[in-house]
Image (spheres, rainbow, N blue to C red):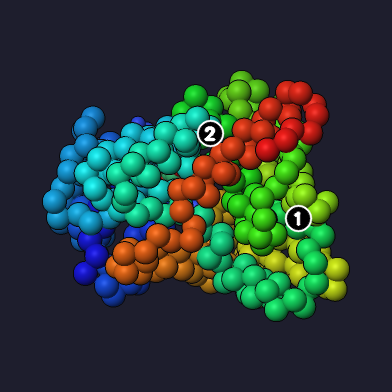
Amino acid sequence: MLKIGLLGSGFVANFHMNGYSRLPNVKVVAVGSRSSALKFASEWGIKTTFSGPDFIEKLCKDPDVDVIDVSLPNFLHLKAVQNASDNGKNIIVEKPLSRNSNEAKEIYTSVRNSGVLHAYAENQLFMPHLEKAREIIKSGTLGKLIRIRSREAHFGPHSSWFWNSDLSGGGCLLDMGSHSIEVGRKLMNEEPSEVIGYTSTSIIRRDLTKAEDDSIALVKYPNGSMVVSENSWAAHGGLDLRFEIYGSEGVMFLDVTRETGTRMFIPSSNKNKYYVVEKGESESGWLYPVMDETFLYGYQGELAYFTSCFEKGELPYENIQDGLKINIIIDAIYNSVISKHWELI
Ligand SMILES: NC(=O)c1ccc[n+]([C@@H]2O[C@H](COP(=O)([O-])OP(=O)(O)OC[C@H]3O[C@@H](n4cnc5c(N)ncnc54)[C@H](O)[C@@H]3O)[C@@H](O)[C@H]2O)c1
């Protein structure tokens, strides 16, 4: 039995718990958080809790824990990974790896020096839609990839720290662009060469944040192929998550949250009482329930894969080095926003 210590008890920690609860050989034995660990632990039946200002240090020292899962806000990833590495624990860390590439390099150095195994939790790679796309691309059916376009958008995150760029490191480009830029990199199966981006803070958000709530980034590959990453925290309509993959021999369209195959209509005189989708904004009209978000967003698949690698003593193919590369690419995009030129990676 692989024993997990979970750092964080918020939005993504709940998805991870759902994922772990489906794995027969894995048990979450401890949870640590600033304040809400007790409530979370009683909801999920977790025996040990840590809270208070040193909850990270205490959980990382727990001898009962084999793996530390870092599901904390971005500004705590470095501290958490360093503590986990110092205590010889294998690590799963949420995206983005860090607020910027300097911090990400420190994270990478700490896992490399300690020799622990590590996973970068880029869940979208494990979405069944994208696993199917990878299989089809690998078969050669789509030919050479020319362009991958991704749009991920909603009307803004759920916790206040996301809006504070000192704590988050950036806005929607870092938060959601980190997904599609990594998905694009893995589908293209090579390293990008140049980037350019545009970011803006919409007029309704200028008092709230210095971070961008709308962005577009072009990630160019040496052969001229392109990943177009469109991200927004200023788009009404609930979570929108789509990919278009254009190849020389064919094309694929993936839609995770709109074409769910299930539609329900609630008249405006009534109110929907049922959970429909992450960040769904509406309680009436046509609604599109997503079947099983933990599975469809890739959380279940990534955790099953990462924990099985750790049990075998293997480094997952999606690891902290990948997270570092994504932070480097995104820093270059932010630089291009200032320079208004293509930036080399
Ligand atoms: N893979 C995905 O699609 C996905 C989705 C959402 C979030 N994330 C990532 O997961 C990580 C956590 O995000 P979240 O959405 O769960 O955040 P959240 O705000 O919902 O939860 C954060 C948790 O950290 C705890 N915490 C401990 N110290 C804190 C402090 N000083 N300030 C604020 N919170 C503190 C909070 O109590 C809470 O339990 C982030 O890195 C985020 O980018 C990934």
Image quadrant occupied by the C terminus: top right
Would you name the residue on which mark 1 appears?
149
Q: Residue at x 63, y 38 (%)?
A: 330
Q: Are marks 2 and 1 in contact (CB under 8 Å)?
A: no
- Total labels: the figure holds 2
What is the quadrant of the N terminus in the image?
bottom left
86 on left or right of 17: left
Q: Is residue 240 visible?
A: no
Is ligand 1 closer than 8 angstroms to the Cβ of mark 1? no
What amino acid is labelled 1 in the image? Arg
Element under disc 1: strand
Residue to which mark 2 is pinned: 101
Within-10-Å neighbours for mark 1: few <14, some 14–19, many 20+: some
Pinpoint residue 72: horizontal percent, then vertical percent: 38, 42
Residue 318 placed where, x, y %?
Answer: 49, 57
- Measured from the top left, where is residue 178 in percent x and y? 59, 46
Residue shown at 27%/72% (left/top)?
A: 25
- For the question of whether residue 4 can be seen, the reply is yes
The front one of 195 and 245 is: 195
Camera-nearest label, 2 or 1: 2
For the view shown, which residue lies furthest in the right direction?
A: 248
In the picture, measured across the screen, residue 327 lies left or right of residue 202, that is: left
Pick the residue in front: 116 or 2: 116
Ligand 1 visible in quadrant? top left
| Residue at the image position 64 percent from the left and 70 percent from the top | 134
Q: Look at the numbered disc 2 and give the secondary structure of its residue.
A: helix
Residue at the location (68% across, 74% down)?
A: 138
Mark 2, Cα crowd under 10 Å, few <14 / some 14-19 / many 20+, is many
Is residue 262 rendered to the left or right of residue 38? right
Tell me if residue 204 comes above or below residue 244 in the rendering.
above
Q: What's the residue type where badge 2 is placed?
A: Ser
Identify the image quadrant of residue 135: bottom right
